[in-house]
Image: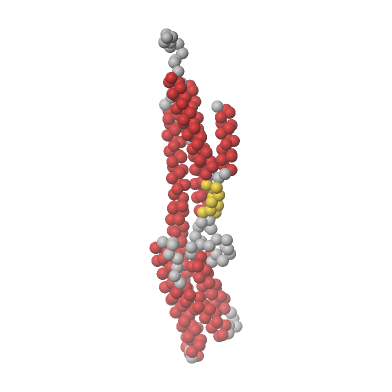
Amino acid sequence: MKKFFIALGIAIIAATAVSLPAHAIRIPHVHSGSHNNNEQHYVNQSDIDTLGEVKTKIDAFTETYSKQDLQPNELLKALTDLQVALKSLEAKTFSSQLGSGYTQASNELKAKAGNVREVVDGGINVLRNGSTAAREKASTEFPNQFNTAVTEYNTAVQNLDKATEEANKKKTAEEGLPYLVILIAAVVLSIVTFIWAFAKKAPQVELRKARRTVALVTLVPLAGAVITYVTFLIASQQQNGGTFTIMTGLMIFGVIVFLRALIGYHKLKRSLANTPASGAPQSPAA
């Protein structure tokens, strides 16, 4: 028995070595911009880029507007740049691969972007065509109008983030389902086998040992299933996804060892059944 488990341990190490690396993908939040990630392309990458551009132009306009010596042409350029980015956002078709919640949130976001753009349009019109009185009035009303519209827009971005998170949860559940099913199957197999091996004692010592061997080897595929599922969950919770390990070698090897142990048990059982008990009368020779 000792030699068997030594050989089993060596084989487990070898089987683990051929396990396959895999990658769990998370869809990044839309407000992040994600311009620094050139290795992966997400299904909503175009959405991220468009919203990142709008955020950049809003920040640039805010910085320009806060200058002490602000010139009208500087303000007009910042407003025009923001106007172009907002129009691009309004005309954009957001990804349809992230579910109805994401689509609904993106439509609300485009509506709020339109509100910001209307305020910006008014500011551009006053700068280009407005009288001195109109400009003075706009200088009083514009900040509140702009801040209100941008606040509502940012709230819509947060709602799109929530929709993205829901899409991530659904994606994680779908991708992790096969590994969860394998884990549940391995747990059930191990529990049933241990109950069979230890709860009901076989009459012969050899059978009891064989049963326990069958039960113990079920821990091998169970270990592979646990490592696979746990590493998948850890990887799927990382911001941009992460690498997890599919313990293919360990699980396949575990199943093979289990079947061999089970077959060996039944062979031993038949052999013992065909062996006369010690002291039993022998039939006379022919």
Residue drawn at x 44%, y 70% is 93
Residue drawn at x 45%, y 11% is 279
Residue 276 lies, with reference to residue 219, above or below; the image says above
Instruction: State the residue in front, 192 or 8.
Output: 8
Instruction: State the residue in front, 29 or 256.
Output: 256
Picture quarter with the C terminus: top left
How many dots with numbers?
Answer: 0
Residue drawn at x 46%, y 36% is 190
Residue 273 falls in image quadrant: top left
Residue 219 appears in view: no
Which colour style is shown?
Answer: secondary structure
Picture quarter with the N terminus: top right
Residue 252 appears in view: yes
Left or right of 13 in this view: 197 = left
Residue farthest bottom in this picture = 131
Residue drawn at x 45%, y 18% is 275
Residue 286 lies, with reference to residue 7, above or below; the image says above
**Percent of width and height locating residue 41:** 53, 62
**Percent of width and height locating residue 72:** 55, 85
